[in-house]
């Protein structure tokens, strides 16, 4: 019953959102370079996702489907994501210096940490020499991680539905882990929200209600997801080890790291937009947009499968970490070779 109501609420919000943003003139206009879509598409993705998450989690709480022993971290993450969403929306309308976005993200992350006292206190046995305990040093490291993943998610938002598919597989993975431990399992609600967003963003429900995330939506997804990964990997109620979280943000993270290194080598600002991303390289080499999205979604599904395997097989943290570095190494080689060819 709960999930039927969640689907209904999402369909209503995701139908009204694009129409509202069109009326307000908050649309994405193609520029012939990075933005090569046709027509003006509403930038209502972030707004709809925030509204849907908030409404559905409040509904679950009203129906007493939540675990009262756990803090309402998803709601708090969505609350502190509001400033991140708003500055992203302002940036969508008229671009602002990246420093402003970073300051807002840092302050919002600080607010979440001060409210919940949840941050990365240990990283697990990443290197094979024992647990890496951070203590209070974990506060600035947590902020760095959250801001990094938030912006990596935004950078990865190149095509309709890419970030939505990555988020869907990540949250679905979290849901299976939560259910396997009989723990707080509202993670299925974000899975439903992101699945429905994917259908709207790719135009499968019609061009009239098609929408994009824009900076506001991509930053919002990255911010909420990164905070939830911190929550679910720390403390006595942690569901899985911190290294497994790397696999849930695998593609946005290694794509951003590779892009940053490539831009530094080329002497360009790391936040300067270009087409040196995996999805753009595939598309510019002749792969259709639909196939690119399918490839990204399949890779995200594989990454979450690796996360699940590592978790349930109790694979040592350092094996998982070195596996992550190996994947990044080959990804780096591929992107640099393709960039050099172009």
Image (cartoon, helix red, strand yellow):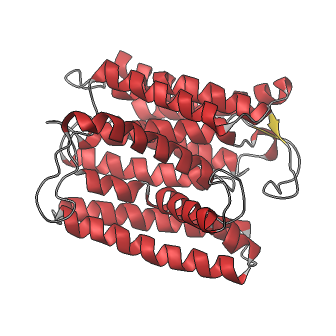
- 322, above or below 8, in the image: below
Choose top left, top right, bottom left or bottom right for residue 10: top right
- Outermost residue, left direction? 130
Q: Residue at x 55, y 64 (%)?
A: 261
Indicate the position of residue 298 as horizontal and vertical percent values.
51, 68
User: Residue 190: horizontal and vertical position, in percent?
Assistant: 45, 39
Q: Is residue 148 visible?
A: yes
Q: Residue at x 29, y 70 (%)?
A: 322
Image quarter of residue 146: top left
Q: Decide if residue 64 is in sight here.
A: no
State left or right for residue 19 relative to residue 244: right
Task: Say which of 158 and 182 sits in front.
Answer: 158
Q: Quadrant of the N terminus?
A: top left
Image coordinates of residue 207 in percent, x first then y, are 80, 46
Q: Is residue 114 above or below residue 278?
A: above
Q: Is residue 106 left or right of residue 87?
A: left
Q: Residue shown at 48%/46% (left/top)? A: 148
Indicate left or right for 66 with 283 as reference: left
Quadrant the C terminus occupies? bottom right
* Near-viewer residue (220 or 117): 117
């Amino acid at each position: 019953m709960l999930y039927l109501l969640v689907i209904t609420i999402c369909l209503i919000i995701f139908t009204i959102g694009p129409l509202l943003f069109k009326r307000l003139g908050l649309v994405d206009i193609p520029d012939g370079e990075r933005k090569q879509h046709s027509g003006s598409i509403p930038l209502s993705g972030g707004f709809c996702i925030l509204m849907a998450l908030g409404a559905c989690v409040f509904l679950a709480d009203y129906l007493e489907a939540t675990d009262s022993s756990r803090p309402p971290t998803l709601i708090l993450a969505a609350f502190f994501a509001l400033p991140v969403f708003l500055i992203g929306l302002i940036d969508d309308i008229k671009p602002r210096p990246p420093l402003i976005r970073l300051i807002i993200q840092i302050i919002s992350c600080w607010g979440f940490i001060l409210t919940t006292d949840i941050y990365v206190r240990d990283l697990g046995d990443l290197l094979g020499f024992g647990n890496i305990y951070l203590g209070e040093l974990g506060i600035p490291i947590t902020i760095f991680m959250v801001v990094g993943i938030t912006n990596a998610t935004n950078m990865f938002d190149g095509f309709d539905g890419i970030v939505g598919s990555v988020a869907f597989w990540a949250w679905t993975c979290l849901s299976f882990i939560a259910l396997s431990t009989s723990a707080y399992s509202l993670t299925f609600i974000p899975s439903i929200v992101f699945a429905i967003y994917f259908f709207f963003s790719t135009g499968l429900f019609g061009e009239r209600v098609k929408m994009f995330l824009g900076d506001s939506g991509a930053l919002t997804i990255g911010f909420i997801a990164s905070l939830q990964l911190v929550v679910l990997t720390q403390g006595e109620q942690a569901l899985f080890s911190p290294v497994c979280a790397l696999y849930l943000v695998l593609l946005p993270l290694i794509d951003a790291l590779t892009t940053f290194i490539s831009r530094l080598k080329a002497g360009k600002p790391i936040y300067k937009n270009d087409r040196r991303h995996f999805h753009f390289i595939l598309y510019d080499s002749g792969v259709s947009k639909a196939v690119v999205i399918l490839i990204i979604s399949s890779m995200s599904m594989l990454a979450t499968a690796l996360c699940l395997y590592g978790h349930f097989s109790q694979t040592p943290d350092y094996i998982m970490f070195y596996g992550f570095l190996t994947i990044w190494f080959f990804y780096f080689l591929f992107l640099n070779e393709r960039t050099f060819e172009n």
